Image (cartoon, grey):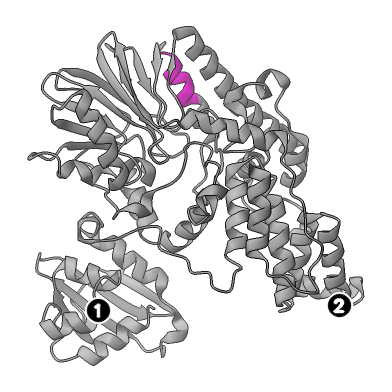
Amino acid sequence: MIKYFAVILLFSLISCSKNSPSNIDIPLTSEVEKLIEHSEEFKKEVITFDTPGGKIHFAIGFGIANSIMVEGNDGNIIIDAADSVFEAKQIYNLFSEKDSKPVKAIIYTHNHGDHTFGAAHYLTTQEDKPMVIAHEDTDFYVQRIIGILNPVITERSTRMFGTLLPKEDLINVGIGPSLNVSKSPNGYLKPDVTFSNELKTSISGVEIELYHAPGETNDQLFVWLPKHKSLMPGDNIYKTFPNLYTIRGTTHRDVKGWINSIDKMQSFSPEYLFPSHTRPIVGKKEIKDILNTYRDAIQYIHDQTIRLMNQGFYPDEISEMIKLPKSLSDSPFLYEFYGTVRWSVKSIFNGYLGWFNGNPSELDPLSRTQKAQRISALAGGDEELIKSLKIAVDNEDMQWALELSDYLISLDLFTSEVKELRQKALIYEGSKSSNPNKRNYFLTSALELNDDFESPSLLNIDDSILNQISIDTLFSVISVRFNPENHDKSLYKACFNFNSGLNRSIILRNDVAVISDNTEQVCNIEVKTNEIELKRVLTGLKSPITSLATGSIQTNGMNTEFLQFLSIFR
């Protein structure tokens, strides 16, 4: 089936031309067949467990992340709220059939959208708002992703999770069937209760212990229910090799911290393990063996990377030298259906020593264009470089073809012919990869090369999510969107006075936008409005012209100047 759809995709992406290389057969490897079988891990259902402390309901196959409901005396607790209001609604309809008591609390295991963006659904199911509990850093990271990193993380996440691919071309995303955040507006709710290291509480008669457990994220926590003998490890355990680094981009993941977090989980000797991805595991011995295997694999990669770093090897060399020992690589919990050993090695190196690999020739290398010019000269000119690209594609030497096309792009020779060849290379490499992250990234990158390609937004924004976004997050976005080329270099100050009593100013100086709460200086423009109105304007939900015309934003007669000021940040 996969071989068939890969070839169909090849023909649909690439128009025929007399200069096209011969059609390429894309192999269906045994590893890709394993990935297809891995989809059974995400069979959509709600499973009920009668633990020693009471019933736990486990929803899997709805978007990427699992959602868990723990029954209490007069209410229930939700652990992870799904990747969208759309999915949360489906899940809770099934949960309610099991037990219809109100939801007293929602616990986020960490900040990722597939665990938090469905929470707002629970505002519509009952009169009282559930308490939202998370680590003290969770909201900071959510604001960071929604705010200053939104464009690049959205683009890279779209590729990695294959959200734009036709349904038949998406096998799975390694830790779930698909990402569905775009199916409804962002439903994130800010936490009401946070903690630093640990929090022990009782909700609706359920004893709950929360522990900070750095791993896939710095704000990760795990949930221990002592009476239920049940552990919810968040994203620190799932049935694939862990994403010690994610290609969509992330802050450095604390690998040593991840190992320590698993050791801490192990100390409770759980009888039930409910991961936020992949299926639950029952049985003290089986859980112990899996936790040991998982943490030992992480330590192996960490320790061997450090050993080879200290011998002077470069990260690309180390990534080729390290392989998991057979005692670990044979475990189905360590198949590379999400993270990979080679990506992990490079991330560990970077986490300890930074981006410079130690090779003096790579400290200040030639620019992409300069290097491309030299490579072209070595090849005998641009036409010979294009000829080499054609030969690479004909020989199915597709990684080399991608690198050759990089040189041609740098030389401003990204012609329709080169684009077509690059598409073929991307489709071939993506289709034969059994790692969903790489597979989806390559196939989506090929799709993006179509002339009529339009990328829809991954995140849908409305007033409900704007209420959860800090106004300071939006001012941070303004700062990083400032393009000095759009400014005439004069000192300029805009002051914002909000109905809430909050004040902020933006000063343009030295080619930076300085954000401050100091409004004592003379302002070139004084803006009076409420926070939600400015949020609407800054996020594009409302035209600033409309806000000015209705008086929702007032500038003391300086409407034109205000619009010109905003244009600097486009």
Whole-percent x, y for residue 298 in the image: 59, 28
Looking at the picture, does residue 465 appear above or below residue 252?
Answer: below
Whole-percent x, y for residue 460 in the image: 32, 59
**Magenta region:** 260-267
Q: Nearer the viewer, residue 16 or 510?
A: 16
Q: Which residue was labeled with disc 1?
A: 543
Looking at the picture, does residue 175 appear above or below residue 46?
Answer: below
Looking at the picture, does residue 408 appear above or below residue 484?
Answer: above
Residue at image coords 35%, 80%: 508
Q: Nearer the viewer, residue 159 or 1?
A: 1
Give the crowd class for mark 1: few <14, some 14-19, many >=20 residues within 10 Å: few
Residue 304 seen by the camera: yes
Residue 383's disc is 2
Residue at image coords 14%, 86%: 549
> Pointers 1 and 2 in contact (CB under 8 A)?
no
Q: Is residue 429 magenta?
A: no
Locate residue 455 relative to residue 417 in the image: left or right. Answer: left
Q: Is residue 262 magenta?
A: yes
- Name which quarter of the figure residue 558 lies in: bottom left
Amino acid on which the number 2 mark rests in the picture: Glu
